[in-house]
Image (cartoon, rainbow, N blue to C red):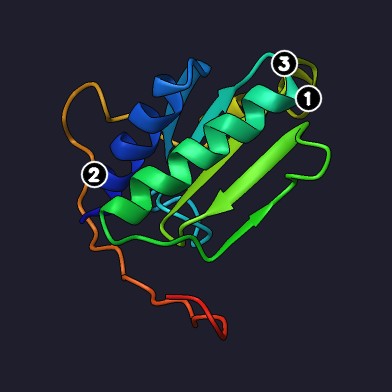
Amino acid sequence: MTSTELAQLIRTAAEDKRARDVVIIDLVGKTTLADYFVIGEGDTDRQVRAIVDSIEEACKRHGVRPLGISGMKDASWACIDFDAVIAHVFLPGERTFYDLESLWQATATRREQAGEMPKKEVRRRELPRKAGSP
C-alpha cells in the first residue's frame, strides 16, 4: 500500500465515523516527518476515540499497523503515527488553537485534487504478541 492509498484509507475510515472537515495535507518534499497528514475532528471526546479506533481497525485490515497512538486519555487531540502518514483527530477547539492546516499549508503543496500525489510504499510492521494472546 502506498502512502497515498494509506492517507485515503485513513480519510475514509474517519469519515465512516462522521469525522468533520477531513483534509489530507501533502508534505512530500517539505519535511522528512511524514508524506501526509490527515486531519479531522470529532464533536466529543467519545467521537474522537471512535474515529481513532475506526482508523486503526481499517488499517489493520489492510496489514498496516501504527507505530504509535497518543492522546487517547483525554481525547482532545489524538495522533496516530503510521510513519509515512500521520493522522490527527481533534476536538473543534483544539483544532482551531493548533491550526495545523495553516501551519503546514503554507509550506505544503496540495496536489491531491489534481491526482498528482506521489506514491511511496508503506512498510508493514508486525507487533510483538503478548503472552496468552492468539
Tag shown at residue 94: 1
Task: Locate residue 115, reporting x and y percent.
Answer: 16, 29
Q: Earlier in the sequence, mark 3 or mark 2?
A: 2
> Residue 9 or 30: which is nearer the viewer?
9
Relative to 52, say whether 80 is above or below: below
Q: Earlier in the sequence, mark 1 or mark 2?
A: 2
Q: Residues within 10 Å of mark 2 (few under 14, many from 20)?
A: some
Whether residue 65 sits left or right of residue 102 in the image: it is: left
The residue depicted at 46 percent of the width and 37 percent of the height is: 54
Whether residue 123 sits left or right of residue 76 in the image: it is: left
Residue type of the residue flagged with mark 1? Glu
The residue depicted at 45 percent of the width and 40 percent of the height is: 55
Visible residue check, residue 27: no
Q: Answer with the quarter of the image where residue 77 lies.
A: top right
Residue type of the residue flagged with mark 2? Glu
Visible residue check, residue 131: yes
Q: Are the two marked residues, 1 and 2, in contact with CB atoms closer than 8 angstroms? A: no
Q: Answer with the quarter of the image where residue 14 lies.
A: top left
Mark 2 — residue? 5
